[in-house]
Amino acid sequence: MIFIDTCILIEYAKGKIDIDFNENYFINSIVELEFKVGALNKRELLKINKILSQIKSVNIDQDILDLSVSLMDRYLLSHNMGVYDSIIAATCLIYDLKLWTLNKKDFRYIDELILI
């Protein structure tokens, strides 16, 4: 089971990455929001929503937010961890998902997180 980072969806929308949506891929609301923010017009937003409709979404609950705060405490100053990255990482850790990202530098310091 794999969590898809926003950068992967952007590359997919550009036709640079192929994704078989029959696999067990997941996102959360953070990825949805980050992906939608890139829409320049209604046509692009429709395309983005069509892509998102093919992917299962996992809920961000209090356990994820608590772990996200803990990750920020550990990595904010040493690695400049961002809020969204902490929520994505916490989601992966809570749901035991591997993270598919092109931005490995943003997550590589989290030993428990498996990156692909």
Image (cartoon, rainbow, N blue to C red):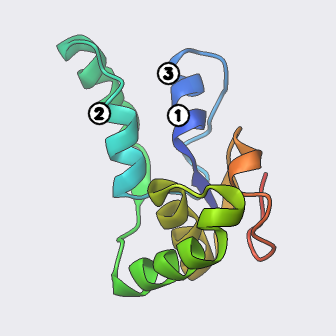
- What residue type is disc 2 on? Asn
State the image coordinates of residue 107 (x, y, percent, origin top left).
71, 57
For disc 2, the neighbor class at 10 Å (few under 14, some 14 to 19, many from 20) is some
- What residue type is disc 1 on? Leu
The residue lying toward the viewer, choosing from 76 and 68, is: 76
State the image coordinates of residue 90 (x, y, percent, origin top left).
54, 73
Residue on which the image places disc 1 = 9
Instruction: Give yes or no for contact between labels 1 and 2 (Cβ–Cβ under 8 Å).
Output: no
Label 3 and label 1: CA atoms lie apart by: 6 Å
Ranked by sequence position, the earlier of labels 3 and 2 is 3
In the displayed orientation, state which residue is furthest to the front. 77
State the image coordinates of residue 47 (x, y, percent, origin top left).
33, 22
Query: Which picture quadrant has residue 71?
Result: bottom right
Residue on which the image places disc 3 = 13
Is residue 22 positioned above or below 88 on the image? above
Secondary element under disc 2, as helix, strand or loop, is helix
Residue 49's disc number: 2
State the image coordinates of residue 115 (x, y, percent, origin top left).
77, 57
Instruction: Write the residue at 65% across / 69% down.
Output: 75
- What residue type is disc 3 on? Ala
Q: In which quarter of the image is the N terminus?
A: bottom right
For disc 1, the neighbor class at 10 Å (few under 14, some 14 to 19, many from 20) is many
